[in-house]
């Protein structure tokens, strides 16, 4: 049986769901062709868990009619937002390795609910802060992924998740792992994930019904591998090493940390740059390509 690729995007407003899905597939195919000279099998479906429309009145629009997302995406025009929290631009391109290392050391030293770590999350990643503090919003943005995973749980699933989407996916996968017949995630890719941040991990036990923040584990429905991909310049994943933050699940699966250079121009956090890196070709090829 051929696997299905299910993807969930990251924070902020996005292009329309069809366009975004097409461009993720283009970036994915570019990486496969670049590193393995391979192509996606025509019987492998690609589905996008799109949740930006739960928050924004209108999607982003392209300033030109692009035919490809590689090697760079066309400029986009920002449209209006419906009742947003205050969003800060992600500081991905101007952060040096030295700054990132200092920030990681500071973040590691913070207690789970210190007076610093909560404002740190609210300032750096307001979308995720909103997700943890608004239960109605949390349920709304989880539903597209829940629906797709349940719809295709009879097939092996390769899950691609980026940024805030990795946090949503982590929580959703724990929920679905408790089902009588959970979906089977053969490979889970997390790109630019904040799941290592102390200020994020502190909220996970309550949401996922795990006993302790010191005993966080991958969801049990992840059955073969969890590949965590990061660029050292990406401040969203200041803690790039998830392998020492999460215990093994019942299948003995732990995060495998993989460091790449995100080659998207001017943004080390961009999803496209992660998708066309070598990691899909290296870790996903046995199940993904012809």
Image (cartoon, helix red, strand yellow):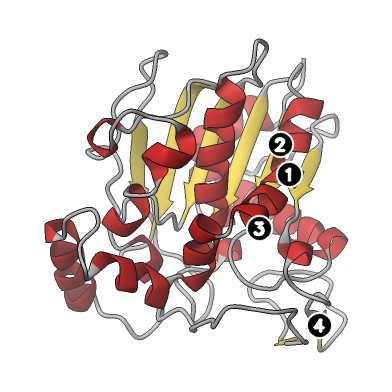
Q: Residue beneath label 4, please?
A: 62
Is residue 6 left or right of 260 when viewed as pictured? right
Graded by Cα atoms within 10 Å as few (under 14), some (14 to 19) or many (20 or more), the crowding at tag 3 reads some
74 or 175, which is in the foreground? Answer: 175
Q: Residue beneath label 3, please?
A: 137
Graded by Cα atoms within 10 Å as few (under 14), some (14 to 19) or many (20 or more), the crowding at tag 2 reads some
Whichever of callouts 3 and 2 sits on the residue coming sooner in the sequence is: 3
Cα separation, mark 3 vs mark 2, equals 14 Å
> Which label sits in the foreground, 3 or 4?
3
Name the image quarter holding the N terminus: top right
Residue displayed at 50% across by 62% down: 128
Name the image quarter holding the C terminus: top right
* Residues marked 2 and 4 touching at CB (< 8 Å): no
Answer whether residue 163 is visible to the viewer in this image.
no
> Which label sits in the foreground, 3 or 2?
3
Q: Secondary structure at mark 2?
A: helix
Q: Secondary structure at mark 4?
A: strand
Q: Residue beneath label 1, please?
A: 143
Cα separation, mark 3 vs mark 4, equals 27 Å
Graded by Cα atoms within 10 Å as few (under 14), some (14 to 19) or many (20 or more), the crowding at tag 4 reads some
């Amino acid at each position: 049986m051929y696997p299905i690729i299910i993807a969930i995007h990251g924070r902020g407003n996005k292009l329309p769901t069809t366009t975004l899905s097409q461009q993720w597939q283009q970036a994915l195919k570019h990486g496969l062709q670049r590193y393995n000279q391979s192509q996606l099998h025509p019987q492998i479906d690609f589905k996008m868990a799109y949740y930006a429309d739960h928050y924004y009145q209108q999607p982003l629009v392209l300033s030109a009619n692009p035919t490809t997302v590689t090697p760079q995406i066309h400029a986009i025009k920002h449209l209006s937002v419906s009742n947003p929290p205050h969003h800060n631009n992600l500081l991905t391109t101007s952060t040096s390795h030295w700054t990132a290392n200092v920030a990681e050391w500071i973040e590691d030293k913070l207690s789970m609910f210190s007076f610093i770590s909560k404002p740190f999350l609210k300032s750096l990643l307001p979308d995720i802060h909103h997700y943890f503090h608004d239960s109605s919003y949390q349920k709304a943005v989880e539903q597209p992924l829940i629906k797709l995973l349940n719809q295709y749980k009879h097939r092996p699933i390769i899950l691609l998740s980026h940024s805030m989407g990795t946090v949503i996916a982590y929580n959703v996968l724990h929920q679905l792992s408790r089902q009588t017949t959970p979906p089977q995630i053969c490979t889970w890719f997390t790109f630019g994930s904040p799941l290592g941040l102390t200020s994020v991990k502190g909220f996970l036990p309550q949401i996922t019904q795990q006993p302790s923040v010191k005993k966080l584990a991958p969801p049990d429905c992840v059955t073969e591998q969890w590949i965590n991909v990061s660029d050292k310049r990406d401040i969203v994943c200041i803690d790039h090493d998830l392998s020492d933050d999460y215990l093994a699940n019942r299948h003995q699966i732990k995060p495998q940390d993989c460091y790449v250079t995100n080659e998207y121009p001017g943004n080390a956090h961009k999803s496209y740059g992660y998708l066309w890196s070598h990691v899909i070709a290296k870790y996903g090829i046995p199940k993904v390509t012809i």
